[in-house]
Structures are given as C-alpha cells and as structure tokens.
Image (cartoon, helix red, strand yellow):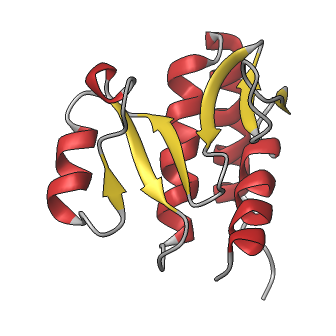
Amino acid sequence: MDELDAAARLREICLSLPEAVEKPFGGHTAPAYRVRDKMFVMTTEDGLSMVFKGAPGVQEALVAQAPERFFVPAYVGRKGWVGARLDVEQDWDEIAELVEDSYRMIAPKRLAALLARRQGEAADHPAAT
C-alpha cells in the first residue's frame, strides 16, 4: 500500500468518529485528527507513520509483538503514545481498533459513549451479505 492509500484509509477511519476533525498541529502541514481540539492521532510530515494514544501497557505489547509495524515515538512515547508505520503492511482492522481506543481516551465521555452505542447497534444489525 502506498502512502496516499494509507493516508486516505487513516483519514476515513478517523473522520468516521463522532465530532472528529482533521487539523494539523503547530506549524506542521501533516494531518492530525482531533476531537474537541484534542489530538487522538497525528501523522508525520513524510506520511510514513502515525502516532496514537495507547492505554497502559499497549505500547510495550505492540512494540514487543511487532517491532516492524510499531515503535515508541519521540517526545510523546514516554506518555504512552504509540507509533505505527504506514509504509509497511498493516492490519487495518487492528489500526481502526487502536484509533478508536485512542479516541475514547481523548474524547469527552459523552462522545465516547456515543461511539460505543453506535458500535453496539452495528453489532446488533450486521450488514446483509
């Protein structure tokens, strides 16, 4: 998958979340995704990786399990954020789950609950095949 496909896929995942918006941070031009002006996903200027907030222990587990896909990012890594390479083969279902978890940790409780309800409704009514 090239960087444009990965960026488009990531954008689709992030912007499907309640009240999520795309807005670069600082003087950067790379996409960052926010809810209520708080970032839950950042991408690098070169488009080769993304960074997301991880629950306690997630960073260590992902990096140990798949160091070719995940890494400890500079600056925010010590705060539990996780880096994911977008220039390697990724499991996009897993990436979507990790992005949603990051969103839940950052979003106000009401929006996080809205996401949980929306996902529960989707599980109750699976798409027809």
The residue that appears at 65% across and 10% down in the rendered structure is 108
Q: Is residue 52 shown left or right of residue 6?
A: left
Which one is nearer the viewer's eye here, 48 or 35? 48
Q: Position of residue 30 (x, y in %)?
A: 74, 41
Residue 13: image location, x then y, percent: 72, 53
| Above/below status of 77 relative to 86 | above
Residue at left offset 64%, top offset 83%:
1
Which quadrant of the structure image shows residue 28?
top right
Instruction: Pinpoint residue 121: horizontal percent, then vertical percent.
Output: 72, 48
Residue 91 located left or right of residue 12: left
> Residue 4 sits in which quadrant?
bottom right
Measuring 56% from the left and 69% from the top, which residue is drawn there?
Answer: 92
For the C terminus, the image quarter is bottom right
Return the residue found at the far bottom. Answer: 129
Q: Quadrant of residue 33?
A: top right
Residue 128 placement (x, y as % from top left) = 81, 81
Q: Against 57, is 95 above or below? A: below
Q: Which residue occupies 68% across, 79% down? A: 2
User: Is residue 104 placed above or below 50 in the rendered structure?
Assistant: above
Q: Count all numbered tags in the image, as a single digit.
A: 0
In this view, the residue in front, 4 or 62, is 4
